[in-house]
Image (cartoon, helix red, strand yellow):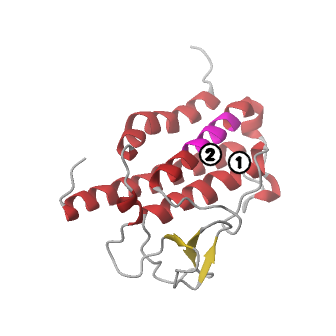
Amino acid sequence: MNELDWNQTLREQLEFHWNHHLRVRLDGLTDDEYFWSPVPDAWSVRPRGTSTAPMQGGAGDFTVDYAFPEPVPSPFTTIAWRLGHVIVGVLAARNAAHFGAPAASYETWEYAGTAATALDQLETQLDRWLAGVRGLGEAGLRARVGPKEPYPEASMADLVLHIHRELIHHLSEVCLLRDLYLHTNGATR
């Protein structure tokens, strides 16, 4: 039996889910769905100056709602908010910390004002992440993540697994919100 290629196996976990489940579920995402809030006072991405959340982050025409510390219970979040979280906090910040991408943070990001722009940002960051993981090789997966992460002694393989869990988890929530929107508003895809 040939030795297992752990780098490929870790990438395929996400690539398969993205290529065969998530991407098709995100096709056709409308701006109405992107900003739709099924409950009052949900956190979202909003035009600058229109938020009532305790804090807002973002460098462009749109900001993301948040608070620190996060309220308990956590506020409900829209598709726009969830995509912003995945794009910036899960992917772009890690791409910057580990793979030489430009610095990224919730405060400095230019959040997408349309669903199409958000999906473009998501694909760009996902492609960077997967290319970075591919470049790690076996030795890179064993290396420690270092002080740029909350658990500096963890391996890059641990980080890869964590990021993939986060992506699968949050993007599945986006798919669920799309289903809720469809069944609540009688829309068709």
Camera-side residue of 114 and 37: 114
| Badge count | 2
Element class at badge 1: helix
Q: CA distance from mark 2 to mark 1?
A: 8 Å
Q: Which mark is residue 125?
A: 2
130 is within the stretch colored magenta: yes
Residue at (62% x, 45% y) in the render: 125
Pick whichever of labels 2 and 1 is earlier in the sequence: 1
Element class at badge 2: helix
167 is within the stretch colored magenta: no
Residue at (65% x, 47% y) in the render: 158
Furthest residue in direction left, as rendered = 186
Q: Amino acid at mark 2?
A: Gln
Q: Where's residue 33, x and y in %?
A: 35, 60
Horizontal relation, residue 112 to residue 177: left or right:
right
Q: Is residue 48 above or below residue 32?
A: below
Q: Main secondary structure of the magenta part?
A: helix
Q: Where's residue 17, x and y in %?
A: 44, 38
* Range covered by the magenta-colored residues: 123-132
Camera-side residue of 123 and 49: 49
Residues at badges 2 and 1 in contact (C-beta under 8 Å)? yes
Q: Where's residue 178, x and y in %?
A: 32, 56
Residue that badge 1 annotates:
95
